[in-house]
Amino acid sequence: MAKAATKTTVKRTDSTAASIKRATPSKAPSRLAKPSRAPSEAPEEFEPQTRVVFNLDEAIRSLSPDVAWLPPEVPVDLIVREAEQVARAARAHRNKMRKLPTKIDFLDTLEPRAHALAAADEEYRAARLARLKADLRPLREEAEVLKRELLTAAQFLLRDEPQILAQLSAVSDGDALDDLVEDLNVLVTIAKSRPSKFSIVDLTGGTQKAIARAKEIATRLATECEGERHDDAVMSAMRKRNRCYALVVQALEEVRAVARFYFRNQPDQLLPFGFVYRVTGRGRSRYAVPTQAG
């Protein structure tokens, strides 16, 4: 995991709409039938159309192999919620937005892409937890507590130091074991560089003991990181998570581009399509892209 401020870029690919299954067009309702739509949705003229069925395997095969080694720039839980919000907003205007030159599968598959990402992230977390030695799990939990305490204290005590805050913004992201180790080391270095300020903080067990304990845990967990990188189950789950993240970003970009044009004269209508998170600088993963990424 690098602390570089470079933003991950996701390679755009051609639409896979031609190769995925499509649902049967719905029949027009009879004159006596009542329209079935949520009360909050704006009425749209009825237009028979097919809905794209999302095929995760097809979508993943359309991506560049390098995408598997690019970690999420935005926390997964946040981008999943963001994608669900944008998908709901797009559904209310789908019939008209689809008339614009766009990849219609992105309008229909944004939400299932988000759900696939959430599931892949759970698989990745489970794989990491499964390989972590039982005696190290309590140590990792203690490390998470120390990280939160040191980070919160540093953000408050050093709020007038822009350079330090820039480092802390990167510490806030990432949940892999090597992220945790590196974050602890960064926080310990910062805390030791400002002893007078940290001396007034009442951390668990005492400030100096907490700092020393954080360094000790980081050292012990560092050896475990190497094992995680060589675990096939963990790395396979990580690559799937990264690919699913790329699919969500890909669809979000296209749906938002359509929305920006469609509502170009109604900026207030763009609010549901807005961002809720900004990348703060963790950047690309420290996992190097192998010669043959699979």
Image: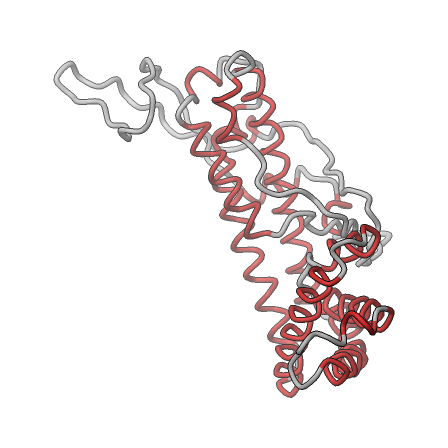
Q: Position of residue 192 (x, y in %)?
A: 84, 73
Q: Position of residue 285 (x, y in %)?
A: 78, 54
In this picture, residue 178 sits left or right of residue 123: right
User: Residue at 80% across / 79% down in the picture?
Assistant: 215
Q: Is residue 78 above or below residue 260?
A: below
User: Residue at 85% across / 70% down in the picture?
Assistant: 189
Q: Position of residue 80 (x, y in %)?
A: 53, 46
Coloration mode: secondary structure
Residue 121 is drawn in which quadrant?
A: bottom right
User: Residue at 56% across / 32% down in the picture?
Assistant: 274
Q: Quadrant of the N terminus?
A: bottom right
Q: Position of residue 164 (x, y in %)?
A: 81, 57
Count of numbered circles in the view: 0
Q: Residue furthest left?
A: 32
Q: Is residue 48 above or below residue 61?
A: above
User: Residue at 72% across / 47% down in the picture?
Assistant: 280
Q: Is residue 108 above or below residue 68?
A: above
Residue 46 is drawn in which quadrant?
A: top left
Question: Closest to the observer: 280 or 137?
Answer: 280
